[in-house]
């Protein structure tokens, strides 16, 4: 019975239904209604989360085939179908989305008053669209969700953002849009030459194209995904967007939106354009190394907490792109793990900033100091996430980074060495941030009366902390599910040749538990 | 002979109704304007049925002066339906401002009949006849607000430039006639194929004539560089007339372009393709860039419509069934978007005074949330952001373009759509991000709410079931080949 239940469609539909309810209720603007719609939004997102947990329970980790597949005719004339399904690569991104969404709603629970219905509807619709992005197995359907995500995010930054929010919202929208329209052209080209937009079919058909064509297509894909990741030098929209966005917006942006780029590389660039991917791998390495070193240094000098974490995101995501383009199971699994870990940790760091911002209304590092005396619980949680961000062994950040570095070392020692400097620099800027905010004397008199985290805040921070540590101790919980799907990408003939050519000594996958 | 009349029966029906209404209005005075408007709108709706009954098989009438096919039927249905909706809107428009003219619906009908003749023409003379009937009605409509200097200016400007274009077209037709001895599309097609068979070179006069006709048509669709009249006419005309201009004559003009390109000059496709590619690219670029600095909503929408024409013409430049099909889909979506958007514009009033500055929308997301939502949907749809209908319009167009290796046009198209997204988003910014100045009037009639609601729903939900529109447009487009 459960096999027949369209669980992915249900996951997409529930938030939409929730937002319709909110819109209907919001017509009458009363105080009780304002409270009710908040609860409706929360319940909707929790329901979606519960349902997505079912996804994980019934997930079969031994098959590389897509699971929970739904396939219906949609634009029949053009052979475009409503085709949903997930595999090991996408399942955790859906979970990440559904996990972070209730947290996003909770973090703005008391602070958002302006245009509340629009706020809740934006987040719920974004949840639907993000689930759609990760569950789509049709290129056009994917594109539809992929670009539609921009609309709610544009509103979130623009309406509830900081002082310079309009600029940030436009920059975010237009940057990503120009990337995605090039993806659209690539999509159309592929469709015209294969007659289908079915992703599994394309993964078999597109690699047959000549290298010349593949290169152009790869660049079109790259334009879109590199902006999303974001890779240096396409990252400039990210600090602006993060600094201006409200806390919940930053959480979803860092937690999920950035992952679409990495997911896109894994779902499209690698399987569909394997030759071009290996051709352009050095470019990716180069840009990623620059990103790791340059943005880490930039992060070091930031005076705004959110900006610092935003730059650290760019550096962390650079590990992801290096890992993906190692074409080794270790590297790719490390990259996926790094994305999941970063989704949790950076989201939590933005939440931490949100906690103090709600009290002090400033994100300037210099205004803080000595918080440990007034906010011990906060100091502890912030430390856990700082450590996880640095990649301390025993936290989730470590597993992703070490797997990526191992994978990279087998392919390009130089890249691995440069990338490893990022780990050191990462420790530098995060520890320094922690020192300046948490330790030292209380200089700012306003801090004397600051209160520690309340129940609501603990409710969403503690689970994230537990998760960050759990994944650090027992990464196989995630890696086992990913494994088969990653192998499947690599076995699509082309990469095996590359590994042969390089007569690399270790082609065995190393996961920490083996 | 009787069969010939069957094909123009919808046109005859509409003319008869319009004449009766004219006599009624003239004898009974303006008092009955609302009844006249209602009957006119109903007559337009009714003519849909007549058009469908006239049959979708390809047939010529009156010694091949007139042609009827699935394509013309499709375009005519779009024309009369859009015309009917605008006429209904005119009633709602006058509910809040007391002055209604019974001439409005009658002029609408006359111009629509002109468009129908123009679209169905199989001879340059028929084409010119229809073109002038529609143009003259439109000139009067543009100037219909007699008390407004701007409106008179708009009408006069439109008339002078329109007459110039008509003159250019007539000169072009005469050149074609002089060098080929015929003005009939079917006969011209034979001449082209004979030329191709005998390897003879094309007489230069025909080429010049073709260029002139195409220029005149470019003027009618307001493609760059023949677009200059559009912003002024859009701004100066009464808003309801602008709504009509944006939705109805645009469809007719684009259909005319298709007919002229594929039927009248079907053998010269390689020659006119270059022109179409140029005006298409130029329209997209100018439409998106010039709109950025506009402060008047109507002018902004005028530039936006120039941009849309640019996208539409990509389909014509592709010159394939897919291209025409994509154009027809785009046209339908464009008409729905425009009617919705102008419907919103008509009701932009503050203390019963119409406002049309972009800044007047500031912060209305808080004071008039549904209104802001509707405008946002139309704006995002025009920008081509999925999942709204406008995205699919562009999607099919680009599909056709890349299928014909028109890569430069496709790339210009996507880049200008990003630039265009800027000013569409800017409108959303003003509505959602800015602080409200004052609320807009909320008195919107039920009929208007229905029209707006339906076009919003069409734009949002089109993606769920795109099949029927595709099937119909495919059938219509195939009739041209």
Image (cartoon, helix red, strand yellow):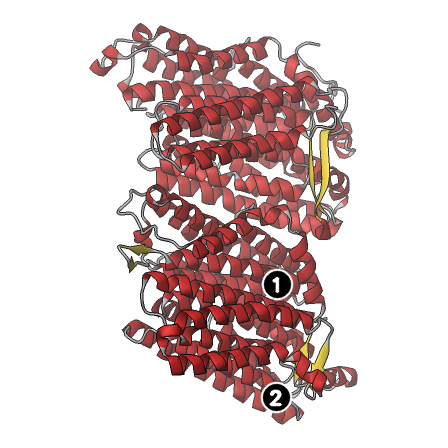
Q: Nearer the viewer, residue B434 or A12?
A: A12
Q: Is residue B346 above or below residue A301?
A: below
Q: In the drawing, what numbered circle is on residue B306?
A: none
Q: Horizontally, is B448 left or right of B186 in the view?
A: left
Q: Is residue A359 above or below residue B443?
A: above
Q: Could you give the CA–CA distance between mark 2 and mark 1, rounded to whole angstroms?
A: 28 Å
Q: Residues within 10 Å of mark 2 (few under 14, many from 20)?
A: many
Q: Nearer the viewer, residue A491 or A137?
A: A137
Q: Quadrant of residue A429?
A: top left
Q: Chain of mark 2?
A: B
Q: Position of residue B55 (x, y in %)?
A: 71, 72
Q: Does mark 1 fall on the same chain as mark 2?
A: yes
Which residue is identified by label 2? B176
Q: Position of residue B346 (x, y in %)?
A: 38, 60
Q: Position of residue B28 (x, y in %)?
A: 38, 80
User: Mark 2 or mark 1: which comes first in sequence?
Assistant: 2
State the residue lying farthest toward the front. B28
Which residue is identified by label 1? B328
């Amino acid at each position: 019975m459960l096999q027949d239940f369209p669980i992915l469609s249900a996951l997409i539909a529930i938030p939409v239904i929730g937002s319709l309810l909110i819109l209907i209720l919001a017509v009458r603007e009363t105080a009780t209604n304002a409270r009710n719609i908040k609860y409706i939004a929360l319940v909707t997102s929790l329901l979606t989360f519960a349902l997505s947990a079912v996804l994980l329970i019934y997930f079969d980790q031994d098959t590389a085939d897509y699971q929970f597949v739904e396939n219906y005719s949609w634009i029949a004339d053009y052979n475009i179908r409503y085709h949903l399904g997930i595999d090991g690569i996408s399942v955790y991104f859906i979970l990440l989305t559904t996990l972070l969404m209730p947290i996003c709603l909770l973090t703005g629970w008391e602070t958002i008053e302006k245009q509340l219905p629009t706020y809740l509807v934006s987040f719920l619709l974004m949840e639907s669209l993000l689930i759609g992005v990760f569950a789509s197995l049709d290129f056009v359907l994917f594109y539809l969700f992929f670009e539609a995500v921009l609309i709610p995010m544009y509103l979130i930054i623009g309406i509830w953002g900081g002082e310079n929010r309009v600029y940030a919202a436009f920059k975010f929208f237009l940057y990503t849009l120009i990337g995605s329209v090039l993806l659209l052209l690539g999509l159309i080209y592929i469709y015209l030459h294969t007659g289908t937009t079915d992703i599994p079919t394309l993964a078999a058909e597109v690699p047959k194209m000549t290298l010349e064509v593949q290169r152009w297509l790869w660049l079109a894909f790259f334009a879109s995904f590199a902006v999303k990741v974001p890779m240096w030098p396409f990252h400039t929209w990210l600090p602006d967007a993060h600094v201006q966005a409200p806390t919940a917006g930053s959480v979803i942006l860092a937690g999920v939106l950035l992952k679409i780029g990495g997911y896109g590389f894994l779902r499209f660039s690698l399987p569909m354009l394997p030759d071009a991917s290996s051709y352009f791998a050095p470019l990716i390495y180069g840009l990623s190394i620059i990103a790791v070193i340059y943005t880490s240094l930039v992060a070091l000098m930031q005076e705004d907490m959110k900006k610092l974490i935003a730059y650290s995101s760019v550096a962390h995501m650079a590990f992801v792109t290096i890992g993906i383009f190692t074409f080794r199971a270790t590297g790719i699994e490390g990259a996926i793990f790094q994305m999941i870990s970063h989704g949790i940790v950076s989201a939590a760091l933005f939440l931490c900033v949100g906690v103090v911002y709600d009290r002090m209304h400033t994100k300037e590092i210099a205004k803080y100091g000595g918080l440990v005396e007034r906010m011990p619980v906060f100091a502890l949680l912030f430390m856990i996430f700082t450590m996880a961000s640095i990649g301390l062994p025993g936290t989730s950040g470590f597993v992703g980074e070490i797997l990526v570095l191992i994978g990279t070392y087998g392919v390009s020692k130089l890249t691995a060495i440069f990338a490893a400097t990022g780990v050191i620099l990462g420790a530098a800027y995060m520890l320094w941030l922690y020192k300046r905010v948490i330790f030292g004397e209380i200089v700012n008199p306003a801090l004397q009366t600051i209160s520690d985290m309340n129940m609501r805040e603990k409710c969403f921070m503690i689970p994230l902390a537990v998760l960050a540590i759990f994944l650090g101790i027992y990464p196989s919980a995630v890696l086992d599910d990913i494994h088969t799907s990653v192998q499947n990408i690599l076995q699509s003939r082309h990469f095996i040749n590359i590994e042969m050519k390089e007569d690399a000594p270790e082609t065995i996958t190393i996961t920490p538990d083996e | 002979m009787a069969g010939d009349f069957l094909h123009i029966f919808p046109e005859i029906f509409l003319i008869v109704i319009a004449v009766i209404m004219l006599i009624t209005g003239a004898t009974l005075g303006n008092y009955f304007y609302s009844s006249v408007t209602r009957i006119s709108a109903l007559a337009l709706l009714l003519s849909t049925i007549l058009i469908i009954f006239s049959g979708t098989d390809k047939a010529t009438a009156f010694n091949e002066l007139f042609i009827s096919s699935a394509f013309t039927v499709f375009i005519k249905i779009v024309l009369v339906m859009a015309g009917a909706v605008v006429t209904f809107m005119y009633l709602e428009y006058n509910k809040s401002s007391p002055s209604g003219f019974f001439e409005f619906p009658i002029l609408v009908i006359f111009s629509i009949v002109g468009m129908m003749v123009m679209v169905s023409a199989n001879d340059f003379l028929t084409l010119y006849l229809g073109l002038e009937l529609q143009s003259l009605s439109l000139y009067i409509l543009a100037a219909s607000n007699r008390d407004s200097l701007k409106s008179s200016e708009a009408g006069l400007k439109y008339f002078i430039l329109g007459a110039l274009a008509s003159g250019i077209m007539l000169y072009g037709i005469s050149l074609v006639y002089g060098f080929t001895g015929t003005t009939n599309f079917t006969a011209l097609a034979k001449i082209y194929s004979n030329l191709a068979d005998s390897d003879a070179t094309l007489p230069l006069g025909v080429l010049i004539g073709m260029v002139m006709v195409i220029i005149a048509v470019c003027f009618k669709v307001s493609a760059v560089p023949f677009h200059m009249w559009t912003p002024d006419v859009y701004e100066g005309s009464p808003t309801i007339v602008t709504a009509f201009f944006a939705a109805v004559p645009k469809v007719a003009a684009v259909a005319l372009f298709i007919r002229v390109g594929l039927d009248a000059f079907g053998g010269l496709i390689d020659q006119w393709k270059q022109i179409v590619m140029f005006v298409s690219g130029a329209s997209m670029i100018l439409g998106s860039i010039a709109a950025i600095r506009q402060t008047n909503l109507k002018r902004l929408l005028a530039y936006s419509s120039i941009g849309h024409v640019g996208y539409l013409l990509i389909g014509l430049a592709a010159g394939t069934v897919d291209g025409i099909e994509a154009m027809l889909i785009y046209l339908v979506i464009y008409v729905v978007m425009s009617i919705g958007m102008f419907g919103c514009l008509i009701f932009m009033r503050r203390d019963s005074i119409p406002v049309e500055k972009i800044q007047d929308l500031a912060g209305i997301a808080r004071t008039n949330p549904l209104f802001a939502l509707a405008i946002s949907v139309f704006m995002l749809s025009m920008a081509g952001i999925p999942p709204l209908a406008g995205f699919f319009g562009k999607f099919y167009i680009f599909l056709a373009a890349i299928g014909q290796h028109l890569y430069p046009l496709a790339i210009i198209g996507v880049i200008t759509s990003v630039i265009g997204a800027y000013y569409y988003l800017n409108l959303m910014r003003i509505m959602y991000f800015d602080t409200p100045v004052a609320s807009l009037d909320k008195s919107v009639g039920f009929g208007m709410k229905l029209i707006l609601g339906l076009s919003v729903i069409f734009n949002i939900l089109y993606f769920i079931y795109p099949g029927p529109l595709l099937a119909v447009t495919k059938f219509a487009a195939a009739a041209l080949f």
